[in-house]
Amino acid sequence: MIMNENENKNVNNEISIDVKNVTKIYSLYKRPSDRLIDTFHLMPWKKYPKNEALKDVSFTVKKGETVGIIGTNGSGKSTVLKIITGVLTPTKGKAVVNGRISALLELGAGFNAEYTGIENVYLNCTMMGLSKEETEKKLPEILDFADIGEYVYSPVKTYSSGMFVRLAFAVAINIDPEILIVDEALSVGDVFFQAKCYRKFEDFKRQGKTILFVSHDLSSIAKYCDRVVLLNKGDKLGEGSPKEMIDLYKQVLVGQYKDEKNAVVKEGLNTDTLEYGSKKAKILDCKIYDNNGRNSNAIIKGTSFKIAMEAEVLEDLEAPIFAFTFKNVQGTEITGTNTMIEKSITEGIRGGSKLTIEFTQDMNLQGGEYLLSLGLTGFEKGEFTVYHRLYDCINVTVVSDKDSVGYYDMNSKVDIKYH
């Protein structure tokens, strides 16, 4: 059940969002006809498997707070936001909202492709509860933020994807809401528009607006949030400071967190890893260790960390080379090294050997998500040979509360001298 402030006279005026014992259960259907049969109870004896997307989840957001929700894919983050905004109805429990919401969930979901940009602005503002006069006052600000020029008078179906999200974001962010709900929507458009989005987000914080923020970007969570809620597979695992919850999330990512039933909550490695090679030698496993020596895929920027690659050599190798590479999510190689560059292995390795190669370095990449690739190559009679390569096998999160421009931080020190 979704309630607003007018429907619930007992709403605490200090609370903007109150999620109470919310459970959401979906039935899983193999065929479209199964949904029809179940909806109209045409075969009451037939049972369908269930999926609990949320399990008795409760939390509150006070006025003026910025609260983050984190968790792995499938943890229920987007589901709870859709229940708060009224897009979904909970199976049990309720969500009470006290204030006007602007939700950056599925940008442009209410846009009509046949309408012009201007017409869609009016349409969406009306859907958000603004009168025509209020929309007209907001229009210059919306158009200035979107910055798509004369295209605003053309049908939306002629827009590029970048223009579309710019206009959708501009509408959602400029209606002066009391509560802003954001689901992975700040990184839209080009880098300049992203910077504009984050400035607007920071303006909201300075104005004391209430913000509920879902993101995989732990750096943004650490930087902006006052409190964080951690979800996993529909359960609320914890609630507390960003540092506490990010640390707990890191345990979930590497299978070191145990719930109240002492069951390990585990997130595995990427199952879509591309691999190839002659397999004369194989990469068996790879673990990442943070500066505390703990196995973790989340590394704090500015700290040291270790990549430990386990390998097995099946046949004699003349000159093996062990390598790693970091790429961003767009596929651009950012950095990497190998044992040849580091002058670490100069002799051959006999077949039947097992070994662990450890690369230790400082994490100076900007906060965000990266993909780690591994390589085991070498030379045979002067010819370069690939024994085993694993592409995008581990997702690494860099946690940072201070990012500079570009891919990595030069750790500049600033000294100001007055003369």
Image: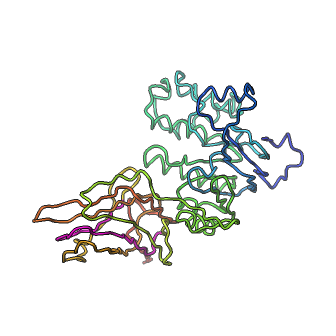
Residue 73: x and y in percent read: 56, 51
Q: Residue furthest top?
A: 114
> Total marks drawn?
0
Q: Residue at x 43, y 49 (%)?
A: 191
Q: Is residue 207 magenta?
A: no
Q: Residue at x 69, y 49 (%)?
A: 54
Q: Is residue 341 left or right of residue 130?
A: left
Residue 34: x and y in percent read: 64, 29
Q: Is residue 309 magenta?
A: yes
Q: Is residue 372 left or right of residue 173?
A: left
**What secondary structure is the stretch in magenta mostly built from?**
strand
Q: Residue at x 37, y 75 (%)?
A: 360
Q: Residue furthest right?
A: 9
Q: Residue at x 32, y 57 (%)?
A: 333
Q: Which residues are magenta?
A: 301-326
Residue 208: x and y in percent read: 69, 55
Can you say whether 124 is above or below 216 in the image?
Answer: above
Quarter of the image where one finds residue 226: bottom right
